[in-house]
Image: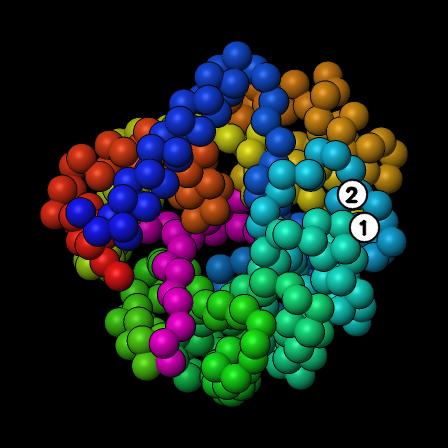
Amino acid sequence: MSSTILKKLFSGLKSSLIGTRNMALLYAQIPLKPKWLVFVVTEKCNSRCTHCNIWKTDNLVPPLTPAEIEKTLRDPLFSETKYIQVSGGEPTTRGDLDDVILSIHRAVPDAIIQISTNALLPARVLKVARTALDAGIELYIGISLDGIGEDHDKIRGIKGNFNKADKLLRELVEIRNSSAGKLTISVGIVISDLTLKSVDAVRSYTEGLNIELTEAWYNESSFYGNIGKHSFSNNLNDAIKSQSPSPLKELWVKELKGESIKFPCFAMNTFCVLKANGDIVPCLNYYNESAGNVRKATPSDIWRSMQMKKVRKTVKECRGCLNSWGAGWSIESSHYQTLIFYFKHPLFTLKLLIKD
């Protein structure tokens, strides 16, 4: 048996033990520290997306400053955080995004930082990328792409958006290929009836650039302000069935069949959301369920508060969701669903073991 296979088996065993511990602590109501953090650095957005109404948000509260961000993330609560997703709104609408990223890195130096962007301000993305890589940050940049050419522009509501995204992606690929730093580039498409005709084209486009593709379920939530705005048809089946096997894909199929998708959710345990105004909330579905504000209390105090206990109870009663990071991180935290998936798909599992 090769050393690579042994390493993968050992990693799987380690994940199983950690997952068992996490499940025990979850059911004993003993809080875990966040491994993942979604940080909404601004609710301001310069897109006009059909899928989302964030751009209509009024009365924006001044977001956390770089100094406030660094103080917040230096709290012991985030001592085990390994991945921080910088999101919005549109992060690049913040003129101080460089300082925001550097403040995160100073507070949590070992964390991977992801920046999600619509690519409407490509020069700012490139500047932030170079700043981050020069600082030794392991960087992940995700760019939204819901179609090719005018198909993307129509859904995103901004003419010329695709051309900017295309040019930015190609420049980022050049940086990735020439830089000594570690840069991962990804494209994200929202799977809905509006984008079905574009799925294959976007897949081909990303393969041509040798970049990752995330196919995300269309989410309705208070975060997006789009509850009840759209409906689904069974036409989504073909797009989902053509994806590679995964535990998340199986949840998608269950949802389309009308079956339960409930799973042990680790929101407010192994992950949470930090809003631009300083509120700590579970996820996008419960975006208005604040457990406290870091401008008024320390993150550690919020994590142990009575209000947090109430929010965790709300999370426990959730029917489940198909958010790619909320569901994905919960599945990774428990690991048992991953094990079940591996046993159900032995040939796929074997390919993963012998790959590389």
Q: Position of residue 177 (x, y in %)?
A: 48, 81
Q: How many angstroms separate mark 2 from mark 1 (CA)?
A: 6 Å
Q: Is residue 228 magenta?
A: yes
Query: Picture quarter containing residue 96?
Result: bottom right
The magenta-colored residue range is 209-234
Viewer-nearest residue: 45 or 203: 203
Quadrant position of the C terminus in the picture: bottom left
Say which amino acid is labelled 1: Glu
Other-residue count near label 1 (Cα within 10 Å), few / some / many at <14 / 14–19 / ≥20: many
- Residue 307 screen position, x and y as percent: 72, 21
Label 2: which secondary element = loop
Rendered position, 91 above or below 126: above
Determine crowd level at label 2: few under 14, some 14-19, many 20+ residues with C-alpha closer than 10 A: some
Is there any visible trace of residue 184 in the rendered image?
A: yes
Residue at horizontal 18 percent and vertical 47 percent from the top: 1
Q: Which residue is outermost to the top?
A: 28
The percent position of residue 19, horizontal first and vertical second, equals: 42, 28
Where does label 2 land, which residue? 74
Left or right: residue 298 versus residue 155 is right
Across and down, in percent, residue 27 comes to 48, 15
Q: Amino acid at mark 2?
A: Arg
Question: Can the viewer see residue 254 in this picture?
Answer: no
Q: Residue at x 62, y 31 (%)?
A: 33
Q: Residue furthest left?
A: 347
Residue at image location 36% in from the left, 76% down from the top: 210
Q: Main secondary structure of the magenta part?
A: loop
The residue identified by callout 1 is 70
Quarter of the image where one finds residue 159: bottom right
Which of 123/176 is in front?
176
Asked whether 242 falls inside the magenta stretch, the response is no
- What is the secondary structure assignment of the residue under circle 1? helix
